[in-house]
Image: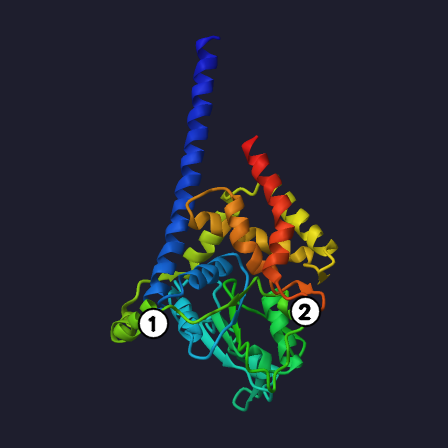
């Protein structure tokens, strides 16, 4: 091999190394953004580290979260802390009506226009102007979403699925960072409208929240004054940083064909299980892919592993699968159908 060929190979090698370093730097920056966001929210919400992590995974993966919780469990604090930790940075194209956080208290008499916004007549200009509703925010807390009518739920479905609202045949885009944390009380069923399957399918995760442990509850009581001050002085990340982290993770975190094969095999096994009345949709698997990438990035990896699948799959499928009458143990059904595909995934990674 002559000296020119060796020089060309050295040039190619150095170029590839520079590209790898650039990828690593970009992913590290994205991971730091997510970690800052997580640390900021943890200052306000104690004893809920798993829930905080899942909420941030859903936010960056462009999904939404349904919390099934008890009153006073910290859902409003979580949503508000997450929303206020993300600030606008004056990026071009950002609607001036977009705010950090909005809370919507759903009631049976709520109208779609109360959520989306409504045209208002201005006598000075002799014209109608659109008054933006509470959906125009980075983070929206949809409190007790199952207490509102199907008509309002349908308006939420368009916003969550397509990031837009339509009022009087005019479509208004929502922010790219639009994220919904919805809640429902698992025990209080009086005067509720159960969410239909299409609405449930819009949520990436459904999280059942139990009461926090004794030590965490004591810490909540001991630090409430400090946390109230921290809500003013907290660290923050910009909207552009979060969107850049989303793009970087999407482009650099690798999902192997073996991971996708395992997801498809688990889904098909569930649909064929006699204990399952209705299996999960293909869309649920598509929505899960970016969540797996974010989960891997939070753990400092540029590839999705079986560990990520085992962590997220029950959260993604739990509210999408309808069990046959008489079957109540969802966890066992999932474990049984995950066993063989996950074993095959583990063997494929050893080869």
Q: Where residue 118 sits in the image (x, y, percent)?
A: 58, 83
Residue assigned mark 1:
217
Furthest-top residue in this view: 2
Q: Is residue 307 left or right of residue 343?
A: left
The reply to whether residue 129 is in sight is: no
Q: How crowded is mark 1: few (under 14 residues within 10 Å), some or many (20 or more)?
A: few
Q: In which quarter of the image is residue 173?
A: bottom right
Residue 250: numbered disc: none
Could you tell me which residue is drawn at 66 percent across and 62 percent down? 321
Q: Is residue 203 left or right of residue 53?
A: right
Measured along the vertical axis of the image, is residue 4 above or below residue 198? above
Residue assigned mark 2:
197
Q: Where residue 296 sits in the image (x, y, percent)?
A: 47, 47
Secondary structure under badge 2? Answer: helix
Q: Where residue 116 sits in the image (x, y, percent)?
A: 57, 78
In the foreground, 310 or 326 = 326
């Amino acid at each position: 091999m002559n000296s020119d060929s060796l020089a060309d190979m050295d040039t190619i090698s150095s170029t590839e190394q520079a590209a790898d370093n650039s990828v690593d730097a970009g992913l590290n920056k994205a991971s730091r953004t997510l970690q800052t966001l997580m640390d900021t929210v943890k200052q306000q919400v104690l004893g809920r580290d798993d829930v905080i992590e899942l909420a941030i995974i859903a936010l960056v993966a462009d999904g939404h979260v349904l919390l099934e919780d008890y009153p006073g469990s910290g859902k409003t604090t979580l949503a508000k802390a997450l929303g206020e930790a993300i600030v606008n940075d004056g990026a071009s194209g950002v609607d001036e009506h977009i705010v950090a956080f909005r809370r919507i208290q759903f009631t049976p008499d709520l109208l779609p226009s109360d959520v989306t916004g409504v045209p208002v007549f201005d006598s000075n200009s002799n014209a109608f102007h659109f008054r933006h509703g509470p959906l125009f925010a980075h983070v929206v807390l949809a409190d007790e979403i199952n207490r509102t009518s199907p008509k309002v739920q349908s308006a939420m479905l368009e916003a969550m699925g397509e990031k837009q609202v339509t009022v009087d045949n005019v479509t208004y885009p929502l922010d790219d960072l639009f994220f919904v944390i919805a809640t429902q009380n698992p025990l209080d069923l009086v005067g509720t409208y159960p969410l239909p399957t299409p609405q449930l399918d819009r949520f990436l995760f459904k999280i059942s929240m139990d009461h926090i442990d004794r030590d965490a509850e004591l810490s909540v009581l001991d630090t409430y004054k400090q946390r109230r001050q921290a809500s003013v002085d907290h660290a923050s990340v910009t909207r552009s940083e979060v969107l850049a982290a989303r793009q970087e993770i999407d482009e650099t975190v690798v999902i192997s064909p073996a991971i996708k094969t395992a997801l498809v095999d688990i889904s098909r096994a569930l649909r064929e299980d006699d204990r399952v009345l209705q299996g999960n949709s293909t869309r649920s698997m598509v929505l899960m892919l970016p969540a797996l990438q974010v989960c891997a990035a939070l753990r400092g990896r540029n590839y999705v592993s079986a560990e990520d699948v085992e962590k997220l799959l029950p959260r993604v499928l739990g509210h999408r699968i309808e069990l046959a009458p008489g079957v109540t143990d969802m966890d066992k059904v999932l474990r049984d159908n995950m066993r063989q595909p996950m074993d095959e995934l583990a063997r494929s990674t050893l080869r």
